[in-house]
C-alpha cells in the first residue's frame, strides 16, 4: 500500500511511502520478501531445520523465528554475543524468537566474524545436522528475487525510490526491478565503504547510489535529534519508523529535500522496510540513558 505524506515541500516535491511494514505483523517489510523464496527453496530441498545469524535486536532473527514456526521449520539462531545467553528474558527480540520456537547458539563476537568460513559451518553441521542456511540479514540471491517484487506497475510514476541499507539485499532487488526513469537511493544504516561491492554482487543495473551521511554514528547509534524526528513524523503522518533503519533513511530524504538535492517536481517513493519490533529493545536502552523514548511501541 502506498501512503502519501501530506507535507508541503519546496520545489513541488512529493513524498509517498510504501507501507511494506503492514504486510505481516511479525514478518514485515523486507523480511517477508527475503524469506519468501528462501523458505520455498528449503521446503523443495526437504529441509526441516533453518539456521540463521543475527545480533541481539535483529529484525531478521524475529522474522525467521515466526515465519519458520508458521511454515513448520525448526529454527536455530546463531547470536552474536555470548554474554546474552542468560539475558533472553530481558531482550524483547530474543524472547519473542524463543517464544516462537527458535533455539539459540550464542557465540563470541570473534567467532561470529568467522560465520562464513567453512570450518565454522562444519561445526554447525556436526551440531545441528542437515539444515538450510539463511545468511545474516537474510541476503542471498533468492532474497534479492523476493525484493524485486517490492516495486509494482503502480510505482512507475515515481522517479526516485529510497530505502535503508544494511546488507544490500533489499536495494539490489529494487535496483533490478526499477524502470529506466527511476533512480534508487540507498541510505546505509552503518558506517563502511564495503556496501557498494556487496550490492554489485546482485545488482544488474547502475541506476543507483548510496548516500552515506545519515548513519548517525553507526549501526544502532541514535541521537536525540533522530528520536524527536521519528516521534514527530509519527504524530504528523501516523507512520511509525524504526530507529535503526527507516527512521534514518526518512530523516535523510527530508533533509536532502530541504538542501535542494532533488530536482523540482521529483516524485519520491520511500520504502518502509518494517523493523518496528526493534523499538521495544531500543526504548529499554533509551530509558537507561535517560533519553526520551520512541512513542510508538509495538
Ligand atoms: C527494517 C529494515 N530495513 C532495512 C534493512 C536493510 O536491508 P538489507 O539488509 O537488505 O540492506 C533491514 C535489515 O535487513 C531491516 O531490518
Image (tube, rainbow, N blue to C red):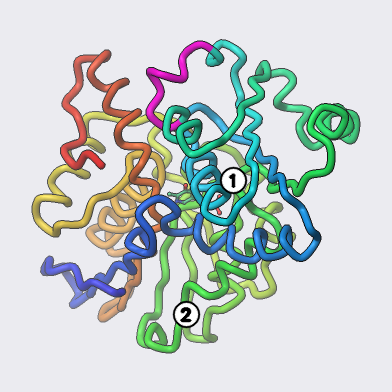
Mark 2 close to ligand 1, CB under 8 Å: no
Q: Residues within 10 Å of mark 2 (few under 14, many from 20)?
A: many
Q: Tell me if residue 79 is in the magenta stretch.
A: no
- Residue name at image x 31 percent, y 74 percent: 1
Residue holding disc 1: 137
Which quadrant would residue 296 be assigned to in this image?
top left
Nearest-to-viewer mark from 1 and 2: 1
Residue holding disc 2: 182
On the rendered structure, is 3 left or right of 176?
A: left
State the image coordinates of residue 7 (x, y, percent, origin top left). Answer: 12, 66
- What range is drawn magenta here? 86-93
Q: At numbered mark 2, what does the secondary structure look like: helix, strand or loop?
A: loop
On the rendered structure, is 56 left or right of 241?
A: right
On the rendered structure, is 295 left or right of 281?
A: left
- Residue name at image x 28 percent, y 64 percent: 260
- Residue name at image x 50 percent, y 31 percent: 98
Q: Residues within 10 Å of mark 1 (few under 14, many from 20)?
A: many
Amino acid at each position: 500500500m502506498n501512503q502519501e505524506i501530506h507535507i508541503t515541500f519546496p520545489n513541488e516535491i512529493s513524498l509517498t511511502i510504501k507501507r511494506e511494514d503492514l504486510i505481516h505483523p511479525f514478518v514485515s517489510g523486507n523480511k517477508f520478501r527475503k524469506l519468501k523464496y528462501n523458505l520455498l527453496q528449503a521446503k523443495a530441498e526437504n529441509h526441516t531445520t533453518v539456521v540463521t545469524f543475527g545480533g541481539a535486536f535483529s529484525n531478521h532473527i524475529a522474522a525467521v523465528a515466526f515465519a519458520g514456526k508458521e511454515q513448520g521449520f525448526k529454527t536455530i539462531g546463531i547470536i552474536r554475543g555470548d554474554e546474552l545467553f542468560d539475558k533472553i528474558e530481558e531482550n524483547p527480540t530474543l524472547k519473542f524468537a524463543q517464544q516462537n520456537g527458535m533455539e539459540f547458539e550464542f557465540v563470541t563476537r570473534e567467532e561470529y566474524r568467522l560465520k562464513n568460513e567453512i570450518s565454522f559451518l562444519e561445526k554447525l553441521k556436526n551440531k545441528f545436522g542437515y539444515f538450510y542456511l539463511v545468511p545474516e540479514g537474510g541476503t542471498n540471491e533468492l532474497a534479492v528475487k523476493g525484493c524485486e517484487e517490492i516495486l509494482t506497475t503502480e510505482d512507475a510514476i515515481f522517479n526516485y525510490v529510497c530505502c535503508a541499507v544494511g546488507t544490500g539485499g533489499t536495494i539490489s532487488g529494487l535496483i533490478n526491478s526499477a524502470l529506466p526513469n527511476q533512480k534508487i537511493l540507498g541510505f546505509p544504516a552503518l558506517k563502511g565503504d564495503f556496501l557498494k561491492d556487496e550490492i554489485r554482487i546482485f545488482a544488474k543495473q547502475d541506476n543507483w547510489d548510496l548516500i552515506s551521511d545519515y548513519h548517525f554514528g553507526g549501526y544502532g547509534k541514535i541521537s536525540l535529534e533522530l528520536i524527536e524526528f521519528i516521534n514527530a513524523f509519527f504524530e504528523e503522518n501516523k507512520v511509525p519508523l524504526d530507529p535503526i533503519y527507516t527512521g534514518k533513511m526518512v530523516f535523510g530524504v527530508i533533509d536532502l529535500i530541504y538542501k535542494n538535492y532533488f530536482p523540482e517536481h521529483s516524485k519520491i517513493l520511500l520504502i518502509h522496510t518494517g523493523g518496528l519490533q526493534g523499538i521495544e529493545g531500543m526504548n529499554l536502552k533509551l530509558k537507561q540513558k535517560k533519553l526520551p523514548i520512541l512513542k510508538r511501541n509495538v
